[in-house]
């Protein structure tokens, strides 16, 4: 037993005997379970028959790890525990134990599955917390691991996991509001800083603003409140959005407006490349010769189709007016020139009005008027080469109108995936932390003529691992995360889940979480979670270590503001 930190079969921790064996469970006699209080031994708690307690079942070559999922009294004994009972007979509780994994006695290694099932009359022992810690961690360098949580019944026993175990195959933090999901994300981010790792945190609500050491904070949207506001505001220039993104923002109708918007965008890009053709910044077409523009379009086709091609979006409404012309001049007789303004302009009036209103919106200034703001793609590039461990992108001031928040976040994800495919993260592994992930996954924006699928982070989950880019998805609605994305998660940290459909989704996605483990999810307290991963020998209930910087996610304080005068 030299491979184990402590002897597994301590007679002082004996709690019962096997009386029935099934493939996945055993029934046991628990003579001490009728005690109304838990016991202690050598400074550690010993519930001796409490639901949720981990136990060890003795075997010849293994210690079988199980968890008590049910405790009851036979019908004949149920009155023996009543204070009014006048019987002297002792109660004889019966427990049901879910078999989880095994510890090899000789080497101390955790073995997935049950090599040899228990036999009738074999003894059951309350598992020492250090043995459960040993079974789950299986690590050599604790100093290089993420200190994540405590064991619930032994708050002086920490659980640490390697970065590879947590983030190597992506990680999902799930749980309803108030369950501790944000605490877990903050704790993980702080540990990434401690280990000098790299992470990009998308803060959808601004609740992680208290993070400090090793974290660079930038704000996408909003503006300084006063001269003393030292926050760093950044922009995401409109030319980093693709054509489909722009179409969703301006929502043109398919039959008449969409073709004009597409032509106007291309014309403005050409106007930026060939300024001699556009002295006023836009391409004038009404009664103008076609050949110079057509030749320039042919000569600059590659540049016009390049990603992030620059143009002046403030002239978009004016360019659309120039696109609404007759194809030929002089009543269709002169094909070398465009004709006069056509009645197509009437159909584009509503589009022009939407564009002008959107471009003037102060909430959209970080996109359409990014002058004076550092472009977020450049900030990301600088961060990857800096000593900062975490880049927090606050999107609290980014508007929901026109699906701006979803489109921009998806575009940033697309940029990160582009960097990953070019090898930027191979020697600098980076974790993308996406809070409120259900807002940015499994959605389609726009209509049948202009539709954008929010798939960037789904693609990162599917292919980013081989490039060194992995994800940490945090959400309170697991049922809204695509099944093919959840299936890519190698580690789950699951807080309280009340909705039955959410629990079913998690149970299906977690290969090691069965119905018995999922049954504990609705009763988890704040900060409690079940940790289960692909390489984990068993689901482990834990109490997450509180972060140093507590997320500011509290709602309105009604008691403070609703007072009777």
Image (cartoon, grey):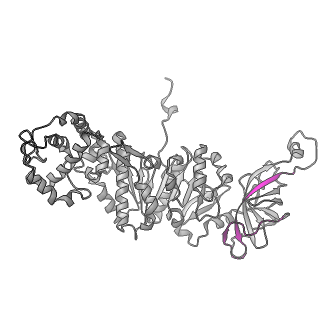
Q: Position of residue 319 (x, y in %)?
A: 16, 43
Q: Residue at x 34, y 67 (%)?
A: 422
| Residue extending furthest toward the front | 333
Q: Give 353 or 86, whichever is nearer the viewer.
A: 353
Determine whether, in the image, residue 211 is placed left or right of residue 11.
left
Quadrant holding the N terminus:
bottom right
Q: Position of residue 186 (x, y in %)?
A: 49, 54
Q: Taking the image as drawn, is residue 539 in sight?
A: yes
Q: Which quadrant of the structure image shows residue 316?
A: top left
- Compared with 418, 84 (above or below) is above
Q: Taking the image as drawn, is residue 224 in sight?
A: no
Span of residues in magenta: 92-119
Q: Which quadrant of the structure image shows residue 349?
A: top left
Determine whether, in the image, residue 127 is placed left or right of residue 228.
right
Q: Is residue 89 magenta?
A: no
Q: Give 435 or 140, whichever is nearer the viewer.
A: 435
């Amino acid at each position: 037993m030299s491979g184990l930190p402590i002897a597994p079969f301590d007679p002082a921790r004996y709690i019962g005997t096997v009386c029935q064996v099934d493939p996945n469970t055993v029934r046991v006699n628990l003579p001490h379970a009728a005690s109304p209080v838990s016991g202690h031994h050598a400074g550690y708690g010993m519930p001796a028959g409490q639901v949720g307690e981990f136990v060890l079942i003795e075997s010849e070559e293994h210690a079988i790890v199980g968890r008590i999922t049910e405790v009851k009294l036979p019908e004949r004994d149920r009155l023996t525990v009543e204070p009014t009972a006048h019987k002297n007979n002792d109660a004889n509780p019966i427990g049901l134990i879910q078999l989880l994994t095994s510890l090899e006695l000789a080497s101390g290694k955790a073995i997935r599955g049950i090599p040899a099932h228990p036999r009738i009359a074999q003894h059951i022992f309350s598992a020492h917390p250090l043995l459960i810690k040993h079974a789950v961690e299986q690590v050599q360098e604790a100093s290089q691991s993420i200190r994540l949580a405590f064991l619930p019944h032994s708050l002086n026993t920490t659980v640490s996991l390697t970065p590879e175990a947590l983030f190597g195959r992506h990680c999902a933090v799930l749980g309803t509001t108030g369950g501790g999901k944000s605490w877990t994300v903050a704790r993980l981010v702080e540990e990434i800083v401690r280990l000098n790792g790299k992470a990009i945190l998308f803060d959808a609500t601004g609740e992680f603003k208290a993070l400090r050491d090793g974290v660079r904070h930038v704000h996408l949207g909003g503006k300084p409140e006063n001269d003393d506001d030292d926050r760093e505001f950044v922009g995401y220039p409109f030319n980093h959005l693709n054509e489909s993104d722009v179409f969703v923002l301006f929502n043109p109708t398919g039959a008449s407006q969409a073709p004009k918007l597409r032509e106007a965008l291309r014309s403005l890009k050409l106007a930026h490349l060939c300024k001699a053709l556009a002295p006023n910044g836009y391409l004038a077409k009404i009664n103008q010769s076609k050949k110079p523009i057509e030749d320039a379009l042919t000569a600059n086709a590659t540049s016009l189709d390049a990603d992030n091609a620059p143009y002046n979006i403030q002239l978009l409404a004016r360019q659309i007016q120039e696109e609404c012309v007759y194809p030929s001049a002089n009543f269709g007789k002169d094909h070398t020139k465009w004709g006069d303004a056509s009645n197509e302009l009437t159909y584009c009036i509503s589009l022009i009005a939407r564009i002008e209103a959107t471009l003037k919106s102060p909430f959209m200034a970080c996109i359409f008027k990014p002058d004076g703001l550092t472009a977020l793609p450049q900030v990301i590039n600088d961060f990857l080469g800096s000593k900062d461990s975490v880049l927090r992108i606050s999107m609290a001031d980014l508007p929901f109108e026109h699906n701006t928040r979803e489109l921009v976040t998806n575009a940033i994800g697309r940029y990160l995936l582009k960097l990953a495919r070019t090898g930027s993260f191979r020697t600098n592994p980076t974790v993308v932390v996406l809070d409120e992930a259900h807002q940015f996954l499994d959605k389609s924006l726009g209509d049948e003529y202009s539709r954008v699928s929010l798939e960037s982070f789904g693609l990162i989950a599917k292919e980013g691992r081989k490039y060194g880019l992995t994800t940490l998805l945090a959400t309170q609605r697991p049922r809204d995360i695509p099944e093919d994305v959840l299936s890519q998660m190698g580690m789950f940290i699951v807080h309280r889940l009340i909705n039955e459909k959410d629990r079913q989704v998690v149970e299906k996605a977690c290969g090691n979480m069965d119905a018995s483990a999922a049954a504990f999810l609705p009763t988890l307290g704040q900060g409690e979670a079940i940790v289960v991963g692909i390489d984990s020998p068993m689901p482990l209930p834990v109490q997450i270590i509180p972060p140093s910087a507590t997320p500011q996610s509290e709602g309105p304080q009604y008691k403070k503001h609703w007072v009777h005068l």
